[in-house]
Amino acid sequence: MVTRRDFIKGMCGAAALASTVSFYPSLAFANVRTDKRLVVVLLRGGMDGMAALAPYGDKNYQSLRGDLSLNKDVLLRVDPFFGLHPSLEPLANLYKKGEMICVPASALPYRERSHFDAQNMLELGSSKPHGLKSGWLNRLVDTINGDDNMALAFGQGMPTIMRGHASVNSWAPSVLPDVGDDYLSLIQKVYANDKLFSQNFARAMDIQDMAMDAVSGNERKMTRKSRSPQAFVTMAGAAGQWLAKQEGPRIATLELGGWDTHVGQGTEGGRLANNLSLFARGIGEMKQGMGQSAWSKTVVIALTEFGRTARPNGNRGTDHGTASTAFLFGGALRGGRMVHKWPGLGDADLYEGRDLRPTIDVNAIVKGVLHEHYGISQRTLSRDIYPNSQNSGLIKGLVRA
């Protein structure tokens, strides 16, 4: 159970500022200048976009994918050409309600296959690895809200996408052993005259009070294992409840790893299917936690660093590729549709003869959302949020006016 005591103990002693919460000045979430929510879900490891969203209408799909192809009878055929993996059933319902957009054959401008470099570019919004000093989401916070705290990263540590000049916070449940109330009271007294510690202590308690409201019952026990894949579902639900609060954050990040499926990827079942199920359940829990009022003002962007090879490898898996599928969710979307320029799966259509060819820039997707959701001008997007990205343009019509 994630208790108030669990949270406090993480900041005690010499490791006070190395706990699972990152502390920054002022927790004035209620002072934000927008009521619109944005969540970025980072799917780390390179998700197989053609497994998550199968192009069953392409005449070359079955022969190209071989043992990893999905029979159209098991697919969730939300579109005459594309079908969602059966593990994504909760998302199919969102699609039908107009609260989901799929963007197949999308990728970063990056054309190599390093997880580290691709994730770095995805989070920095840069044209090359390590090309900027702050994450694009931090720059968004700075653009919208100045010094006010409006963003919260859920998970262990602060992701690169959130790092930068603007003050943001992070939260993850403590996994340290319990300590007694007397010890905690003593620590409080010892540091009572330490301005920095006492302020951070008070802010930490504010965050934990919100966390205890958002995570309850058996979910607290599950969330203590905060590095387990299952924790994504619980933390996504908690994120939804935090974002729904009047005094809560407006921007959040979540992460789900396990997409590097070189071996034993599976089809209807198996490793990838299990991860897709966690992803779908997490999005469903997030929506439920938010409630309709907050959800109607929300856009969720789910991105991965790159896709997988179009053909299976010799280990019934897929290797690092290029294009994948980006997903958008939320009540603020003009959803229930595919946004794509399908490149085809013929031998001549593949990128370098092995990968799904990218036809849509992931950065253009994000810029389109930010332009329409927050009213940020194209000039500001290309100068401040995604510097030197004038050539990528942006995709319009993703968000309701």
Image (cartoon, helix red, strand yellow):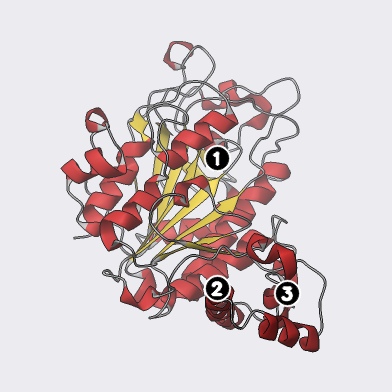
Q: Secondary structure at mark 3?
A: helix
Q: Secondary structure at mark 1?
A: loop
Q: Secondary structure at mark 2?
A: helix
- Closer-to-camera residue (185/288): 185
Q: Which mark is residue 9?
A: 3
Q: Position of residue 347 (x, y in %)?
A: 49, 12
In the image, residue 176 sits, relative to residue 192, either above or below, namely above
Q: Which residue is mark 2?
A: 200
Q: Which mark is residue 138?
A: none
Q: Position of residue 373 (x, y in %)?
A: 26, 57
Q: Quadrant of the C terminus?
A: bottom left
In the image, residue 372 sits, relative to residue 268, either above or below, namely below
Q: Earlier in the sequence, mark 1 or mark 3?
A: 3
What is the three-letter code of the residue carrying label 2?
Asn
Q: Which residue is mark 1?
A: 72
**C-alpha separation, residue under disc 1 versus residue under disc 3:** 52 Å
| Quadrant in the picture for residue 250 | bottom left
Tell me if I can see residue 55 in this picture: no
Mark 3 is surrounded, within 10 Å at the Cα level, by few (under 14), some (14 to 19) or many (20 or more) other residues, namely many
Mark 1 is surrounded, within 10 Å at the Cα level, by few (under 14), some (14 to 19) or many (20 or more) other residues, namely some
Residue visible at 76% across and 66% down? 175
